[in-house]
Amino acid sequence: MNRLTTLLFDVDGTLADTEEVHRVSFNQAFEQAGLDWGWSQETYAELLTVTGGKERIRYFLDTHLPGFEAPGNLDEFIAGLHAAKTEIYTGKAASGNIPLRPGVKRLLCEAREAGLRLGIATTTTPANVTALLQHSLAEDAEDWFEVIAAGNAVAEKKPAADIYFYAMQQLGVTPAECMAFEDSENGLCSARGAGLPTLITLNAYTRDHNFDGAVLVLDQFGEPAAPFTVLAGDAGEHRFVNVDLLKELHSRVPEHS
Ligand code: XBP
Ligand code: MG
């Protein structure tokens, strides 16, 4: 059995409940551009099936505004909107007002103390990761992760497995020594596609997703005084995610899986 050496974390929805902040940032960027496209939570839940902000805007136009005529080149128009949205989002993250989800900071600190390697595998724009880590985790938090695989680092975004393959290649590790942490069906599909055992912490936007194939599905990582709820899988006597639980889950993973 391979030893667990590396933890690979998704960002949006996993480290922090960020999608509401993304949604509001998209809407503010549309308003700034004089567009009345305001995305409701219901619309955004549908659009979240497409990962990547630029791809999501394009999907919105294709499915909701097929007759839209961009002023000039459509790709450039979308890229401009997305850059404005990223500016707004990173400004919000820099305010420190995006809290990490319960147990995230505790688990990351425990993992570092236990000598586990940390990486990030996310679809979001790198600037968003920097702003969240620096202002919600620690000023030097980017240094906690040996690789931050984000956004356009790969050709195909989640649910394709590219971002996880890229992160493992940068780390020089095999899937058998890793565990992935995700919040969505696209994220699970990506991590499983790269052969990674995956722990899910769902959220309001992903509650109804299909998490078949996850090693454990929880409502959150939990804290000693605020235990998690197990929605699928077996956490034994554990009441919050810690390194011992991760090593126990990892030991159960068949070699070939
Ligand atoms: C979530 C995404 C991102 C964010 C928006 O990424 O799919 O597109 O919703 O960020 P993950 P951008 O769950 O993999 O962290 O606008 O920068 O894409
Ligand atoms: Mg996510």
Image (cartoon, helix red, strand yellow):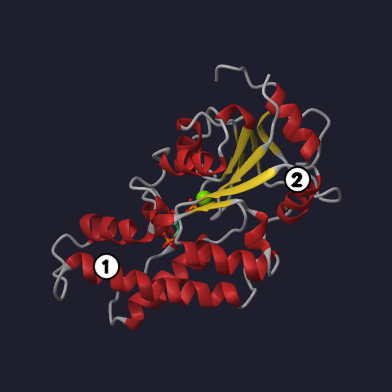
Residue under label 1, please give it.
Answer: 78
Q: Residue 41: where, in percent of width, then height?
A: 45, 61
Q: What amino acid is labelled 1 in the image?
A: Ile
Residue at disc 1, CB closer than 8 Å to ligand 1:
no
Give residue 19's mark.
none
Above or below: residue 95 compared with residue 194: below
Residue 31: percent from the left, percent from the top? 35, 80
Q: In the depicted view, which residue is nearer to us: 114 or 208?
A: 114
Mark drawn on residue 111: 2
* Residue at point 41%, 41% (across, down): 162
Quadrant position of the C terminus in the picture? top right
Mark yes or no: residue 76 visible: yes
**Residue closer to the observer: 251 or 154:** 154
Lower sequence index among marks 2 and 1:
1
Q: State whether residue 234 appears in this view.
A: no
- Within 8 Å of ligand 1, the CB of disc 2? no
Badge 2: how crowded within 10 Å, few (<14), some, or many (20+)?
Answer: many
Looking at the picture, how far across and down is residue 173, in whole percent? 58, 35
**Above or below, comparing residue 124 to residue 49 in the picture:** below
Answer left or right for 216 relative to 68.
right
Q: Position of residue 234 (x, y in %)?
A: 71, 27
Q: Residue at x 62, y 64 (%)?
A: 133
**Quadrant of residue 250 in the image?**
top right
Q: At numbered mark 1, what does the secondary structure look like: helix, strand or loop?
A: helix
- Nearer-the-camera pick, 23 or 42: 23
The image quadrant that residue 115 belongs to is top right
